[in-house]
Amino acid sequence: MLPRRVEAVVFDMDGLLVDSETMVRDVMREVSRRREVTLPDEVFLRMVGLPGAASRSVAVAHFGEAFDYDGWNRDVWALAHERIDAGLPAKAGAAELLDLLDELEVPRAVATSSGHATVERQLRPVGFFHRFQTVVAHGDYSRGKPSPDPFLVAAERLGVAPAACLALEDSHNGVRAAHAAGMMTVMVPDLLEANDEMRRLCLVIASTLHDVRHLMTR
């Protein structure tokens, strides 16, 4: 049971609406192998949910200052765009939850560390792009997750107080950002498991977005 009536819902994108985190992990591994370096899972997982500059810092700390990060990153996104254009599956329950929000006339936003072009590239093929009243993406806020800024901007654009918003996240940094914004926060884990901190910050740890839909109809 949610503690307050939900007046708006703010969604993360990668790993929550579309199955993109697994794809990016696999692409980073492949590009790293081509360059004869290794990207361990624990390093990649520290990058999940971070904006570009912070993600770069994690990678450079692992690969070393002499590593051609910019070239590696270009190769990663060239291959990632090929995979995106081939089609990414929607996460379980995403379409059904959006249908429920349409039925209930609950406005919604995307709050993501990705750029606007990436949002459209990933959400348009699965039919989700026009189902949000606003998209808050890289460049729309001063500080990225785990700062609350992306969620606060989303609430402001929707015209809803943060405390009346339900925030849905799959990453630890996303949960930290949503909780810091004062939103009712639910984690739907993807590559990162819920730990004690996540259970403390979240109202619910959901298995899929189907669970969130059921939560909203109680």
Image: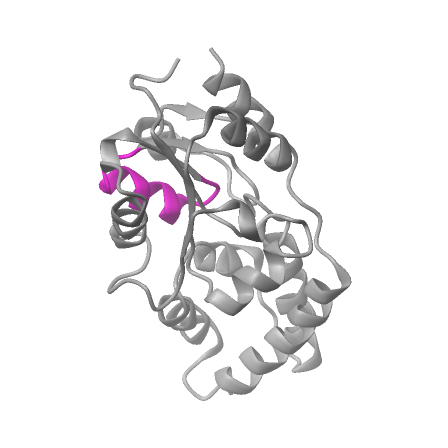
Image point (60%, 74%), residue name = 77
Above or below for 14 versus 105: below
Above or below for 95 versus 104: below
Residue 65 coordinates in the image, percent (x, y): 41, 84
> Is residue 173 shown in magenta?
yes
For the N terminus, the image quarter is top left
Q: Residue furthest right?
A: 86
Residue 208 in view here: no
| Res. 196 image quadrant | top left
Image point (55%, 51%), residue name = 130
Image point (25%, 47%), residue name = 156
Above or below for 105 versus 117: above
Above or below for 49 versus 32: above
> Is residue 74 shown in magenta?
no
Question: Which secondary structure class fits the magenta region best?
Answer: helix
- Does residue 114 appear to the left or right of 140 in the view shown? right
What stretch of residues is rendered in magenta?
169-183
Residue 106 in view here: yes
| Res. 140 image quadrant | bottom left
Image point (38%, 46%), residue name = 174
